[in-house]
Image (spheres, grey):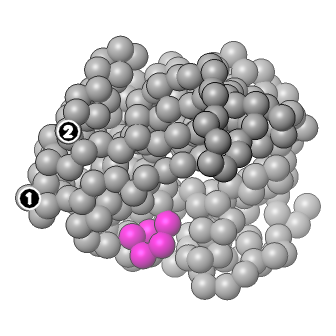
Amino acid sequence: MKPIVTLTLNPAIDASCEAEEVRPIRKIRTSNEGYEPGGGGINVAHVIRELGGEALAVYCAGGLTGQAFDDMVDAIGLPRRLIRIEGVTRVSHTVYERSTGQEYRFVPEGPEFREDEWRTVLAEIEGLEADYVVASGSLPHGVPADFYARIARSLRARGARFVLDTAGEPLRQALEAGVHLIKPNLGEFEGLVGRALPEPAAQEAAAKRLVDDGRCEIVTVSLGAEGGLLATADGCFRLRVPAIEPKSAVGAGDAFVAAMTLGLAEGRTPEDAFTLAVAAGTATVLTMGTELCRRADVLRIYRQIRGELVAAGA
């Protein structure tokens, strides 16, 4: 099996810490500080390797923080293809407030891309041999809205599968080009279809329509504590998550995408890959700060929920 390629245009150094109480104006003393290389595709690649797969992370980085980011990627031993940009790599912050159990997340926009920079990314992806390419995250300033659609067309012409985790106009345009798998949350999915979807039947009909129209082969919608929805040519399925005590939601969606893509690449059925994905997302919520899922937790939850998948309307 070829390594799964992940693409992160706008990675971040993920800084995390704890504070007793977050208050305005006053100096906030923190503890348990941590720093990790983050961003959608980086997290996806990290989880793929945690689950026993192989991944190649393609990402852009620049400035002094970009150099620090490179060092962090090297430290975790992640195979990579670095594309240098002029802009400075962002630093995001997650603060856990011990007194309330609340989590505060501060996410900068990141650098603006020049045209030659985003075109270099396209050329890099076109030059790689891959069966699966995962792109995750919003587009940075300066990158055209049809960027993911261009990748979708290129991969489709080569027989490769494109997995996309983004929202808004870039997602809409990519679907017109045709993708293999998408994973919006419910709010992003409602934005995509242009209306509220409060009822399960409406969610299922909208997801199945994307598949039937040929815009996407597999649609997954993450529903938070309600689990997730899967739509394929064979129908719609739902899977609830087990009751847990959540610690941090950071990276849960990326873990879902990683496990889903790895499962498909390994030859699992979409339903089984979806079950593994829900387990990975749930396992990530069990970890603090920016820490991602642990393989042992994923497999334990997978065994717990395997067989719980139900067909829509059942």
Which secondary structure dominates the residues rendered in magenta? helix
Q: Quadrant of the N terminus?
A: top left
- 236 in the magenta segment: no
Q: Quadrant of the C terminus?
A: bottom right
Q: Which residues are magenta?
A: 167-171
Question: Residue 50 location, x and y as percent?
Answer: 53, 20
N-terminal-most mark, 2 or 1: 2
Q: Which residue is mark 2?
A: 63
Q: Residue at x 66, y 50 (%)?
A: 24
Question: Residue 215 location, x and y as percent?
Answer: 46, 72
Question: Residue 254 location, x and y as percent?
Answer: 54, 42
99 sits left or right of 35 in the view: right
Question: Residue 113 location, x and y as percent?
Answer: 20, 59
Q: Which mark is residue 116?
A: 1
Residue 263, by quadrant, is top right
Observer able to see residue 264: no
Q: Residue at x 53, y 23 (%)?
A: 34
- Nearest to the eye among marks 2 and 1: give it: 2
Q: Alpha-carbon distance for marks 2 and 1?
A: 17 Å
